[in-house]
Structures are given as C-alpha cells and as structure tokens.
Image (spheres, rainbow, N blue to C red):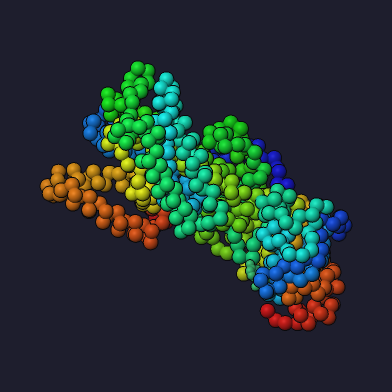
C-alpha cells in the first residue's frame, strides 16, 4: 500500500529530516560551537568559566534530562536532584573501585545506575499521573536524599560525610580534583554536553521521541499505534535519569570538585531544574539551554552585575530578588507561554525570516 | 456531484471473502449501564461494514471492544480465526486493526507529518542505539517510512499542512490527518468512528472518496459508524443496526432500509 517509485526523493527527505534543515540554523550552531570551544576559553577569565559556564553546562544537561521526561513525555518529576545524586555517588564508587579507568568513561557509566534507579521509581507512572506521580517522585527524592546521608558506604566513610573528589587525569592532564584548571574542566563538560545533546536530539526526532510525544498528547491513541505505554514511559524515565545522573556526576567531579558538596541533591535543586524546563520551554532541547542559562546566570548577574552598575545590593538581597523574579516568571510563563523562552526564540526567528515584509 | 452519486459511481468490489472478524453474543456493562447486550455480527474480508443506530446505541463501545479498549463481560470476539476478546489495544494494532475516533484523538503538539509517522511505529525496527545515532540504518529506515507517509499525505491532499502542529488545524483537516495516521499502519481492518461528523458537504464528499479508494485500491476491510444515512447506504456492503445496545437488524443497505424496526427506531426519527 502506498508504495510508489519515489527514490528520487531520498536526498530531499534526508535533507528535510535533518535536525537543522535551514542553512542559517546550521551556521548558527557552528557559530555557537566556535564560541563555546574557542571564544570562551580565550576570552573568559577563570571566575567566569568556573562559576558561570560550568554550572550552566551542568544545569543544561540536567534540564535536558527532565525535559525528556516532563516536556516530551508529559510525566512530571520532582526527583531530578535525587537522580543526579545517584549519578554522583555511583561515579564516586566506580572511581574508587576502578581508579585506573578514565573518569570520563566512569561519568558516562554512572548515568546507567541513575537510569536504573529512575526506571524503578518510574514504575508507578503506568498507573498514576499528574499530581500523584509528582508525589511518587517526591518519595524518590526524599528516600534517595536520605540514603546519600545515612549510608556511609556511599561516601567511603569520609569524615566530611561527602564525596571527596580524587585527582584523575586525561592524557596526563588533571581533569578532576584540586589541581584541575577551570579551562580543562570546562572542556570536559562542554564535550560531554555537546555529545549527549546530539544524542538527545537524535532520539527525540526519531521513533522513540515520537512515541514519547504520542504518549504525552493522547495516550489511548498512542496505544492504538502499537506503542506500549509502559515501555514508552520507562524508556523516558531511563533516558531522562541517565542525563540527570551524568549531570550529577559532572556537578560533583567537574564543578564542585568535592569539599562543599555535602547535601546538594536536595528538593530545592529538583525544583530549580523544573523551573529551568518551564521557563526554557517544555518539549524543547534548545529551551533547556535557555532555561539553564537564565536561571543559573540570574543570581550571579544580580549579585555581581547590579553592584557593578552602581546599584548596591547585598548577597542576601540578591537572592531574595532572584526568588521573586523567578516566581513571577514561572507564573507568567505557565499562563501566557507554556512553551517558554524557546517559543519566544522561534517567534523571533519567524519574524526575522519574513522581515521586513511580515506578510 | 454529491457524495452519494459519487459513491455509487465508485461502487465497491462485490466479491467478499471469508469472515475476518466475528463478534459472538457479546455483552458489555458499565456498572448498571448496559452498553451492549448480546450482540453478534461478522465482518468479511474486503467489505465496508456500517454500524448505525441512535446516539447511545453502543456503536462506539462496539469498536472499543473490537480493538481492545473495553473487554466485554460475555461473548467472544474472533479475529482471523484467533479468539481475542481480552487483547490489549497495542496487540490489536500489531494484529492489523487501526482506528479513528469520534472526537479526533490526534497528538496535538506534533506536526501532521509526525502524527502520521507514529502510524509507522510498529514497522520500524531499528533499536535505541541506532536511533540515538540517527545515521546509517536508522536514517535509511526513517527515510523509507517517510516516503510511505508522504504518499499518504499526497493521497489525502494535505501537503500544505505537513509541518503544522495539528492542534490548530480546522476540524475537517484533523479528521483527515487522523485517517492518514490510521492508514500509515497499513491495517487489514480499519475502524472509522463517525469519520464525517461535523464536516461540510465538500469535506464529506472528499472523505467518502478516500474511504472508497482505500477499500477499492488496497482491499482494506472497513467498519464504519456513520449517521448520514445517504452515505451509509451508498458506501457500505452490509449494515448492522444497534438500538439500546441490542442488534435490531443486519443486512444489505436495501434490506435494512426496508426493515420496520429500523424505520421505527432510527430512520423515522430526525436527528
Ligand atoms: N466508559 C464508559 N463508562 C460508562 N458508560 C459508558 C462508557 N462508554 C460508553 N458508556 C455508555 O454506553 C452507552 C453506549 O455508548 P456509546 O457506545 O458511546 O454509544 P454510541 O457510540 O452508539 O453513541 C451509553 O449509554 C454510554 O453512556
Ligand atoms: Mg459514538
């Protein structure tokens, strides 16, 4: 049925099905990558790279993870931080057991543990939705957070009660631990985020991504397409938690570098990631970056930017202003533009495409 | 030319094969509500089988039983010789049963193209890791299925809305996209729940033509719920009539039309 001689379309379809069919978009991506890989390391100082760029990358990855679950599959989770924690502690145990294995490999592997735990806590999603599922993931959050504190084996019985990041090298260059420079850590983060984002983009544009969105938009019809709801939801939990887990491992090993890492995987972090996804745009990968950039840069920008502009503002006050701004924005976005910053970006591009003749 | 004369012109193939699906004395209750009571009928390969009856007669419930959304408390459903009255919807899909809904059930946030592509889900075999790479075999597979989907889009004349999210399309077009999504499954049995409801005359004519073409060209067996009696009479080979969950008539359109109970129950009342 419907098979016709259509071979000549092949190249057209391949081009049309590319993730960025527009040449301008591809150029845009190339420019962004050039800035990220060359511009920022050249121009940014250590503070900017360590306190702005690395957190931004880590948050972006976590936001992509949550967006896969919430934005693409329509399943809400308040346990993102816990799944990030699973990645971090798995990575710590792995590097303790296998000190010889490259830490980048271990960071990637630790996501698998997080994926497994995510699937476990995702099992109730077959029966419950919305608010009730949110509560179930909240249970994951509290249980895992408890485990991170109460099971000393997880942090190798350190007196600090936290992960103490060991030094690990790549080609002889330290990439984790106290002597790793911000630039090196940044490059590792950037590499991981670029590769994993590429995978995420491929997945959401393919069969699995369509199945997720089908489940999100109309689960009964999805089932009728032959999509097994349990499989679709659990793969979403798995992939989402994998990203969260890798982000968590990166957070401790490449950003915090240990020490102050006690009790970071809290419900507050879960909410921060959720807000990033909402403000950035549900169901949009680029929106995840927007949301992460916005929310991770906002406190820093207020704390250091306003005084620089001559507006005196203390650290505590800046934090309060951040809270109020974020709260207001969440409400505005939820009511006015559920597709978040990503949608505004699209509208902007559309305007640009037709400018200066809008009709 | 109106929908009816057109339907007659493209008269469906007359030789109908063996029984594809048989429903034997099924009963379906929701608590105290008897949606279906002791109904039997069959659908033969290649035919267009209409199910008619007043609102609340149990027509939609019947389709829901056939594709596994509801499981009747009594009776049996046999499809291609296999008993399957406890089968889940995704198994029904795998067995070649596709369906459209009375109140369009599209994936609102997805484009027309992606909606129809989901219809190819079961035919796509490449695993997770190939999909994550989206190159080589996975990309070839996407392209191969995209071609089939483009042919369906051409067939239904919806090229212009290919990339648009379906949530904002007019109702008539949504119904068409939903038909496309069902066709993408290359079903053996296509269940259509009021495919022309809420359409204007022109849209109805188009839909009639599509249904006949699907039946004629691809030999797809069709079970159709429809209220427009003219359409039913012209499109279908056989008609089963339900009232209050019971079957009151079953036969060719002419036979059903002449049946006194049908006239009393259904044809007599305006709706
Ligand atoms: N999920 C359900 N729960 C309760 N009652 C239902 C359900 N589905 C259908 N019914 C009832 O079954 C009867 C038949 O409905 P339906 O099959 O939708 O009729 P039709 O499609 O012929 O208009 C109605 O009385 C309806 O209220
Ligand atoms: Mg109905």
Q: Is residue A248 above or below residue B83?
A: above
Judge left or right: residue A282 versus residue B30: left
Q: Position of residue B112 (x, y in %)?
A: 57, 52
Res A25 seen here: no
Q: Is residue A29 above or below residue A352?
A: above
State the residue in front, B34 or B5: B34
Q: Position of residue B47 (x, y in %)?
A: 81, 59
Residue at left offset 66%, top offset 51%:
B90
The residue at the far top in this view is: A172
Q: Is residue A177 above or below residue B72?
A: above
Residue at left offset 73%, top offset 50%:
B96
Rendered-image quarter of ligand 1: bottom right
State the residue in front, A18 or B56: B56
Q: Quadrant of the C terminus of chain A?
A: bottom left
Find residue A243 and report its image quarter.
top left
Residue at left offset 68%, top offset 54%:
B88
Q: Position of residue A85 (x, y in %)?
A: 39, 40
Judge left or right: residue B63 versus residue A353: right
Q: Is residue A359 above or below residue B248?
A: above
Residue at left offset 41%, top offset 56%:
A338
Q: Position of residue A232 (x, y in %)?
A: 57, 47
Res B105 seen here: yes
């Amino acid at each position: 049925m419907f098979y016709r001689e259509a071979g000549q379309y092949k190249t057209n379809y391949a081009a049309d099905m590319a993730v960025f069919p527009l040449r301008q978009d591809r150029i845009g991506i190339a420019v962004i990558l050039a800035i990220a890989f060359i511009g920022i390391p050249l121009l940014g100082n250590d503070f900017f790279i360590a306190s702005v760029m690395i957190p931004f990358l880590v948050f972006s990855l976590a936001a992509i993870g949550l967006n896969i679950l919430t934005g693409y599959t329509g399943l809400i989770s308040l346990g993102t931080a816990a799944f990030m924690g699973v990645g971090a502690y798995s990575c710590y145990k792995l590097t303790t057991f296998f000190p010889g294995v490259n830490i980048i490999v271990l960071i990637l592997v630790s996501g698998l543990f997080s994926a497994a735990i995510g699937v476990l806590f995702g099992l109730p999603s077959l029966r419950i939705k919305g608010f009730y599922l949110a509560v179930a993931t909240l249970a994951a959050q509290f249980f895992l957070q408890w485990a991170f504190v109460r099971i000393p084996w997880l942090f190798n019985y350190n007196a600090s009660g936290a992960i103490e990041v060991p030094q690990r090298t790549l080609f002889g260059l330290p990439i984790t631990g106290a002597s790793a420079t911000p630039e090196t850590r940044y490059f590792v983060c950037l590499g991981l985020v670029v590769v994993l984002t590429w995978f995420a983009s491929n997945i959401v544009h393919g069969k699995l991504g369509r199945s997720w969105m089908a489940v999100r938009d109309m689960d009964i019809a999805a089932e009728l397409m032959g999509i097994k709801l349990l499989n679709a939801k659990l793969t979403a939990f798995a992939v989402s938690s994998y990203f969260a887990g890798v982000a968590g491992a990166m957070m401790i090993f490449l950003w915090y570098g240990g020490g102050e890492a006690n009790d970071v995987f809290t419900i507050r972090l879960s909410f921060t990631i959720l807000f990033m996804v909402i403000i950035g745009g549900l169901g949009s990968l680029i929106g995840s970056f927007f949301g992460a950039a916005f929310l991770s840069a906002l406190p820093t920008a207020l704390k250091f930017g306003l005084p620089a502009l001559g507006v005196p503002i203390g650290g505590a006050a800046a934090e309060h202003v951040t809270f109020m701004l974020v709260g207001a924005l969440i409400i505005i976005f939820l009511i006015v533009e559920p597709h978040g910053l990503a949608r505004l970006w699209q509208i902007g591009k559309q305007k640009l495409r037709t400018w200066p003749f809008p009709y | 030319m109106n929908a009816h004369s057109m339907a007659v012109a493209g008269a469906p193939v007359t030789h109908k094969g063996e029984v594809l699906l048989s429903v034997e004395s099924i009963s379906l209750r929701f608590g105290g509500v008897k949606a279906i009571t002791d109904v039997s009928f069959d659908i033969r390969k290649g035919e267009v089988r209409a199910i008619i009856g007043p609102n609340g007669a149990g027509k939609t419930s019947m389709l829901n039983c056939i594709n596994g959304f509801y499981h009747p408390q009594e009776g049996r459903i046999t499809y291609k010789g296999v008993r399957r009255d406890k089968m889940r919807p995704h198994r029904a899909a795998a067995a070649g049963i596709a369906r459209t809904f009375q109140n369009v059930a599209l994936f609102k946030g997805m484009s027309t193209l992606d909606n129809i592509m989901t219809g190819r889900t079961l035919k796509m075999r490449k695993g997770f890791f190939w999909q994550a790479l989206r190159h080589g075999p996975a990309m070839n597979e996407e392209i191969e299925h995209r071609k089939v989907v483009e042919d369906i889009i051409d067939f239904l004349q919806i090229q212009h809305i290919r990339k648009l999210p379906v949530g904002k399309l007019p109702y008539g077009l949504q119904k068409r996209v939903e038909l496309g999504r069902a066709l993408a499954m290359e079903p053996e049995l296509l269940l259509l729940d009021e495919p022309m409801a809420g359409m204007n005359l022109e849209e109805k004519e188009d839909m009639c033509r599509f249904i006949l073409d699907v039946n004629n060209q691809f030999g797809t067996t069709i079970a159709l719920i429809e209220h427009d009696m003219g359409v039913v009479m012209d499109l279908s080979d056989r008609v089963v009539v339900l009232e209050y969950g019971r079957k009151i008539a079953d036969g060719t359109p002419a036979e059903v039309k002449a049946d006194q109970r049908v006239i009393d129950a259904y044809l007599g009342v305006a709706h």
